[in-house]
């Protein structure tokens, strides 16, 4: 019996690794906020996903060619740190392109891109899709996977899409990421959470019950909040977007705003397990340490694959208030998250 022990230990280690992923998205627009590949805390993550690439025939093009040097540095630093590097293909605004591309073209494009840049895997992002489009995306991903290319998919975290999984073959799809972002919008008459943790946990369960292996399911959480002018809290009316870029503020800027002024009253909404801050001029709905920890606890307790951060440039650099550290302390407690002193 003893000679089989190493084999069982290996199986346990593989299963454990599949459930402790911490993924950082690095979008091409991070360059405009002065966030560089060297700013990523690679020791805190297991994978970096660069976005985005646009399919064009049998090629994959950079959504922003001016960011190519950042991409090259990101690949190098990730490899040096032994962190998996994935590129995201598609996304919002490219729904039609993702539906129209043929498997043969995408496979040829993926193999060419991987050969040129040495990346590890691809993520196919279907953008805003319905049940029929989801089935097409899964078939596309399966075809790519059958060509010996590591591939994941990312779709909206909407419970109604769980029923579209059906009998799809998910065995070769590495990861199934659900976007739990942008629930709050200035187009809605009343303020609601930007990412409702309680609802997100229910959606994850719905996909698991529909047949997606738990260790392949991963929530994508926003590292930014939404602001609403003249709103008085959750459920209140507003007069459009508040401060920030079209009403959106990175988490680190939200904390800086709280530090610079005492006018915000910050509270934790228990029904949604999300944070809300109210001042005389605006309401901010966001995910802070309590809500992110609640999601991390749920992921660990239920055996889901991990958590992805969108995007990494929005996190605060101080470990005591970092969302990435909060996630890691639950999912990867073996990592040292203390600030290293400079000599």
Image: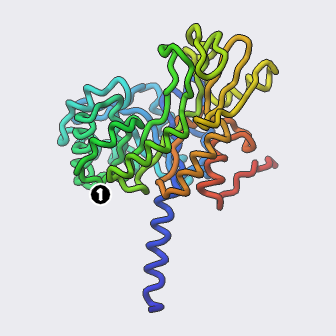
- Residue nearer the viewer, 127 or 227: 227
Residue 92's quadrant in the figure? top left
Q: Quadrant of residue 99?
A: top left
Residue 122 appears left or right of 230: left
Name the one closer to the observer, 338 or 184. Answer: 184
Q: Which residue is mark 1?
A: 171
Task: Report the residue that reaches farthest toward the bottom.
Answer: 1
Residue at 46% x, 25% y is 66
The answer to which of 107 and 168 lies nearer the viewer is: 168
Residue at point 33% right, 42% down? 162
Say left or right for 326 vs 155.
right
Count the marks: 1
Q: Relative to residue 146, is residue 28 drawn left or right?
A: right
Is residue 95 shown above or below 80? above
Give the image location of residue 46, x and y in percent.
53, 52
Q: Which of the 4 quarters of the picture holds residue 113?
A: top left
SS category of the residue bearing label 1:
loop
Q: Position of residue 290 (x, y in %)?
A: 67, 41
Q: Quadrant of the N terminus?
A: bottom left
Asked if one can make out residue 107 in the rendered structure from this viewpoint, the answer is no
Residue at 65% in and 33% down: 269
Query: Can you see residue 35?
Result: yes
């Amino acid at each position: 019996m003893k000679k089989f022990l190493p084999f069982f230990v290996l199986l346990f280690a593989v299963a454990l690794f599949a459930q402790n992923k911490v993924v950082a998205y690095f979008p091409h627009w991070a360059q405009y906020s002065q966030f560089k590949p060297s700013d990523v805390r690679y020791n805190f993550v297991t994978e970096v996903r660069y976005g985005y690439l646009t399919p064009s025939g049998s090629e994959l093009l950079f959504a922003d060619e001016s960011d190519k040097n950042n991409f090259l540095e990101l690949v190098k630093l990730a490899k040096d740190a032994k962190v998996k590097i994935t590129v995201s293909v598609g996304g919002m605004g490219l729904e039609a392109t993702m539906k129209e591309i043929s498997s043969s073209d995408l496979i040829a494009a993926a193999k060419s891109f991987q050969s040129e840049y040495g990346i590890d895997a691809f993520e196919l992002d279907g953008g805003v899709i319905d049940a029929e489009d989801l089935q097409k995306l899964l078939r596309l991903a399966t075809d790519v996977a059958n060509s010996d290319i590591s591939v994941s998919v990312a779709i909206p975290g909407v419970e109604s899409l769980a029923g579209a999984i059906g009998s799809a073959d998910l065995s070769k799809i590495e990861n199934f990421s659900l976007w739990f972002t942008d629930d709050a919008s200035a187009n809605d008459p009343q303020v609601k959470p930007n990412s409702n943790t309680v609802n997100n946990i229910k959606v994850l369960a719905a996909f698991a019950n529909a047949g997606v292996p738990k260790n392949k399911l991963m929530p994508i959480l926003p590292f930014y909040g939404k602001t609403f002018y003249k709103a008085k809290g959750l459920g209140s009316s507003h007069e459009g977007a508040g401060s920030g870029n079209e009403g959106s503020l990175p988490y680190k800027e939200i904390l800086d705003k709280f530090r610079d002024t005492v006018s915000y009253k910050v509270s934790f909404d228990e029904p949604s397990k999300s944070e809300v801050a109210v001042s005389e001029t605006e309401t901010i709905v966001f995910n802070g340490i309590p809500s992110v920890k609640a999601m991390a606890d749920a992921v660990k307790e239920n055996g889901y694959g991990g958590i992805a951060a969108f995007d990494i440039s929005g996190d605060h650099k101080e470990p005591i208030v970092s969302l990435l550290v909060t996630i890691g302390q639950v999912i990867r407690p073996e990592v040292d998250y203390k600030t290293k002193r400079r000599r």
